[in-house]
Amino acid sequence: MPHGHQADDRLDDAMESSAAGMRTLWISLTVLGLTATLQGAVVAFSGSVALLGDTLHNAADALTALPLAVAFAVGRRAATRRFTYGFGRAEDLAGIVIVVAIAASSLLAALTALDRLTGPRAVTHLPAVAGAAVIGFAGNEWVARYRIRTGRRIGSAALVADGLHARTDGFASLAVLLGAGGAALGWRLADPIVGLLITAGIAFVLKDAAREVFGRLMDAVDPALVDAAEAALRRVEGVRDVAELRTRWIGHRLRAEATLVLDGSLNLRAAHHIAVEAEHALLHAVPRLTAALIHADPAGTGREDPHAALAHHAGPSPAVRTGMIGT
């Protein structure tokens, strides 16, 4: 059980962040769904391959809201005896689905554009194509800002990646305008060439999204966050040193584990009090941190050295185990 109301408050905040993520997903799904529908209607009578690629990206971006919505719903389930850390990792799995969707839509657009390069076709209804491109940019940029802002606020790498996907589709929509302009000037290859440029642009965003998502899967965190957590622990009265500090994301929630060096003459009650104060300091200093496990080591055991802490972490003596303070 948490030691105080602060941990409970953080759990409430985590639930609220999941609700905010769900709300963002459904609103963006609606906006992008309408955008893709309008663009698809123009593709049907214009034959623009560049607009087709943009429409496919918008449709794929809208559909990526579904696995994310499932992940947010699953992530709100309570921990079990089998999944003792809860189900927050479902969000990271959804991030993989998003990366695959970005790659698949990019490949499909590239294949279509290459087919048109070998067999150019006339693009008709150019004003409608240009109008659809503007609608695509406006819808995608609005959704991108909304998703990225919410994702960064709640700490969801998958939602940020989804926002980057939408932003790419927005710029791709502007590129469709270039294709329409070239077609208006009589250059029949302009449309498929712009389709290939759109694919190249998406490849750059795919790289950024993949780095964000796979970084989370490898438990990557911002070093500045670790520095802030360590500084907060060192400010706690009674803490002589921070021998070890680890943080990891579980969905859009953070957990921390720390080994603190305390005065070896302290009794268990006093060491426990310092550990609780250290937990509270972490909850205040680290945004989106919902839980911390604090281990107290008496000074003079040799674990003041962080390298020694790592070497001994796997097998501390039973006497050291009795000093474990868990929150």
Image (cartoon, rainbow, N blue to C red):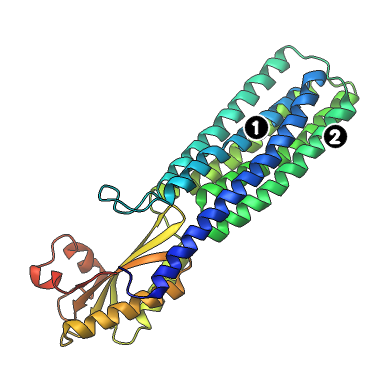
Q: Residue at x 61, y 33 (%)?
A: 60
Q: Residues within 10 Å of mark 2 (few under 14, many from 20)?
A: some
Whole-percent x and y of residue 218?
A: 38, 49
**Quarter of the rendering containing residue 131:** top right
Residue 111 placement (x, y as % from top left): 63, 20
Residue farthest to the top?
119
Residue 262 shows up from this direction: no
Image check: 234 left or right of 47? left
Q: In this image, 192 relative to 92: left or right? A: right
Q: Is residue 145 above or below residue 68?
A: below
Q: Which residue is mark 1?
A: 59
Does the image show residue 306?
yes
Label 2, on which residue? Answer: 131
Q: Position of residue 198 (x, y in %)?
A: 69, 33
Q: Decide which of 198, 125 is in the foreground and name it.
A: 125
Residue type, mark 2 in image: Gly
Q: Quadrant of residue 176?
A: top right
